[in-house]
Image (tube, rainbow, N blue to C red):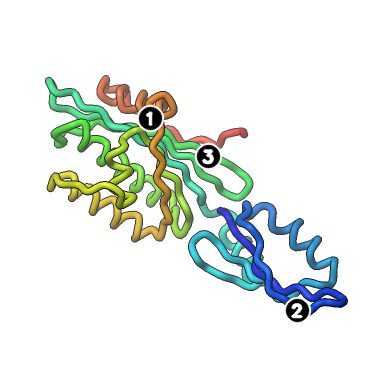
Amino acid sequence: MDIKLKFYYKGSKTKEIQLESEWMDDKAINPLVSDMLKTGRIKDIIVMDEMGREWTLKEYKKLMEKIEEEPRNPIIYFDGGYDREKKESGIGIVIYYDKGEEKFRIRSNAKLHELESSNEAEYAALYNAMEVLHQIGVQQTPCVVKGDAQGVLKQLAGEWPCYEETLNLWLDRIEEKIEAMGLKPSFQTISRNENKAAHRLASQALQNNIIDSHLKIDV
């Protein structure tokens, strides 16, 4: 999660002024604050995060101790495929997230029978990705959603309208899930090549090769 600092600075020959830092990774805060406090010219440090929340430095340190073992900062890749002859859909999901200093990856897919198009499969894939986030306890954190389904991502970002009733119902379900978990999503359209892991999982589901993997990864 990115954070920024708001604080008061008083030089030996200057008036006290309020300053604000740029956004930075929250892992950078401890050494930076330590250096700032050594100057003796900094006071009343406030920490702000991407969710719009603010804490005193003491409150923030207690919060970090509390959420050290909570999953956060998820990155979601999703894809959906559809077999017109068999009227079956395959969905693929890849999720990366942090827990403390460790990083994890989830790879999951499923075959669905009630969908009617490849477009609907894309929405179903993303909804199921949100369900996975809910199951592992992700909440109150920014998240990045990546996929090659430009329509889905543009509609969720509010940039494109959706005129199909069935797809609008999926949009509503996804948005309700995002709101219920308190997520702050950003949506990124990527190429099929960049999304090949999720695409492969969706294809494997259509071939009845079901995968459910949850691993700690080395970075």
Tell me the amino acid under the disc marked 2: Glu
**Dot in front, 3 or 1:** 1
Relative side of 23 to 180, left or right: right
Q: CA distance from mark 3 to mark 1?
A: 16 Å
Tell me the amino acid under the disc marked 1: Ala
- Label 1 crowd bin: few (<14), some (14–19), many (20+), radius 10 Å: many
Kindly identify which residue carries mark 3: 104
Q: Residue at x 24, y 30 (%)?
A: 111
Contact flag, marks 3 and 2 (Cβ < 8 Å): no
The image shows residue 2 at horizontal and vertical percentages of 58, 54
Kindly identify which residue carries mark 1: 198
Indicate the quadrant containing the C terminus: top left, top right, bottom left or bottom right.
Answer: top right
Numbered mark located on residue 24 in the image = none
Contact flag, marks 3 and 1 (Cβ < 8 Å): no
Q: Residue at x 37, y 34 (%)?
A: 108
Kindly identify which residue carries mark 2: 16
Q: CA distance from mark 1 to mark 2?
A: 53 Å
Residue 170 seen from this side? yes
**Dot in front, 3 or 2:** 2
Relative side of 181 to 75, left or right: left
